[in-house]
Amino acid sequence: MSTAPEPIDGGMLHPELRAPDDRDAIIRGGRRLDHAEGTSKPLRTRPEPQPRGAKVYGNRPIDQQEAAARFIAAPEHERMHDERLWDLRQKRDREMHGIPEWEELRSLASAIKEHTLTHLDEYLDQFEANARANGIHVHWARDAAEHNQIVNGILRDHGAKSLIKSKSMLTEECGFRSYMASVGIEVIETDLGERIQQLDNEDPSHVVVPAVHKLRTDVADVFSRTIGTDPDNSDVHYLAEAQREATRPLILNADAGMTGANFVVAETGTFVVCTNEGNADLSANVPKLHIASIGIEKIIPRMEHLAVFVRLLSRSALGSPMTQYTSHFRGPRAGGEMHVVLVDNGRSERLGLAEFWTSLKCIRCGACMNTCPVYRRSGGLSYGATYSGPIGLIIDPTFNKRKYSNLPYASSLNGSCTNVCPVKINIHEQIYAWRRVLAEEHAVPLVKKAAMKAAGMLLSRPAAYRAVIAAADTALAHLPRFVIYNGLNAWGKHREVPHAPKQTFHSWYHANRGAKQ
Ligand code: SF4
């Protein structure tokens, strides 16, 4: 039975949002709605089942196309995902146009990152010395396994059995939650989207909005199965409040807290965490033990550089001027203990890749994902990897070339990702470069390899090419449909092959201009 949505006029909204003369207020049925409710479209009575992500079989290449096709076949999910992310992209554009020095900021951010990455050893040493002077315990982890063991060791030394943590893509990289489960430590995600994904036993599908691929009805389904909410009530406030009520006692009683970091400042030995829910501050401040897991590329030299990145991050990510919380951590609080684990996990190796090292400049804003037409229509879980979207296409193969060999093809190479990237990573060029590298290293599927070889032979022989084009134009007009639309024609799976023009450009040019040359 459906429960009536909670009224939202009695304390849930900030007083300013209840102002009687607010011209932007959305009123429905005499009741004031907030933005999320007001823009939610009514859903079908029978909710569309949520499409699941890519099937992962050990080290076998991920079939992103297959998973994307399942996402596209769920029209409500596909439309909602596309609209939500395009909305973020448009908000980002509005913010960008409000900052005249936007391009200057991007160039500065890029230059600061490039300088830092080319002096990484010096700045990491400087951070370590200053952090230790601030009373922070600093650990170094070569890879994911070492990271997990170090954190487990710290927790074991403190007799900790439960850990609250804020969102961190690095811990996803490390398979941290499943490792902790294997050693009997309960991990509780405190970011709402990440908690939804944890309860649904799914990975995050986006670096900033981890559950963006889910409809409200999907969340209602997850919460009804896991925390006992009404399965028919998908009101966003009811669901958020129910989750808050269920998680808050776990947070208050946790033995330890964990955060990541968005930026690490070498000159002060401090680190900065940017969130919108305040959950990182709970994770860091409620238990006495705070552990921060940080990728070594997060370092910046000085505090003055932080302003450049803070101005770019939230505007690029969500189209808002600032994150709600920008928390600086300098050392343990009175009576507490703080540990920082600096993690490499393949970053040093990536730094040595001439064509791909600048991917380490990434500040995980997600703007390249929000703008990517492939990502918006296929959902982040279709990539079957920790990082999805354009940034995933250039990072994932550095972890495993074979497993992620199909991913660089999940792009139209339109360059929009490069245009929006706040640190000016040449993303689409790196995607293209990966295709070449994978082809050279024979990490390309056989069918694709054979097709490319045939195309290469044809394109290198102009006379043969023209003869084939002329024959194909005639054939397209007369061949039976099944000959053109079959399993070998990937293009024709999702669209009609266009009608061939009566005359090719080459023959037109030859007839009309050729004689004048
Ligand atoms: S590659 Fe650029 S746009 Fe994409 S997440 Fe990283 S910083 Fe943002």
Image (spheres, rainbow, N blue to C red):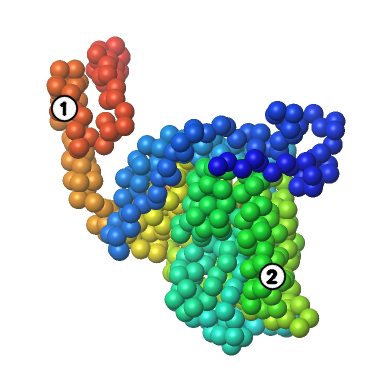
Q: Which mark is drawn over residue 143?
A: none
State which quadrant residue 285 falls in.
bottom right
Name the quadrant of the N terminus.
Answer: top right
Work out which quarter of the rendered image holds the C terminus and state it: top left
Horizontal side, residue 175 vs residue 21: left or right: left
Q: What x and y, as percent, mark residue 47? A: 47, 38
Identify whether 477 is placed above or below 461: above
Q: Secondary structure at mark 1?
A: helix
Helix, strand or loop at disc 2? helix
Q: Position of residue 245 (x, y in %)?
A: 66, 59
- Three-letter residue code for mark 1: Phe
Residue 174 is left or right of residue 193, and the answer is left
- Residue 127 is left or right of residue 47, and the answer is right
Residue 267, above or below 484: below
Is 186 rendered above or below residue 453?
below
The residue drawn where x is 19% and y is 33% is 486
> What is the residue that sits farthest to the front in this orientation?
1
Q: Residue at x 50, y 40 (%)?
A: 81
Tell me which residue sits at (41%, 57%) in the image. Answer: 385
Residue nearest the observer in this picture, 342 or 180: 180
Mark 1 vs mark 2: in front: 2
Q: Which mark is residue 482?
A: 1
Q: Residues within 10 Å of mark 1 (few under 14, many from 20)?
A: few
Identified at 44% across, 76% down, the residue is 182
Q: Position of residue 502 (x, y in %)?
A: 24, 13
Classify residue 59 by image quadrant.
bottom left
Where does label 2 land, which residue? 252
Whether residue 298 is visible, yes or no, is: no
Q: Position of residue 265 (x, y in %)?
A: 68, 69
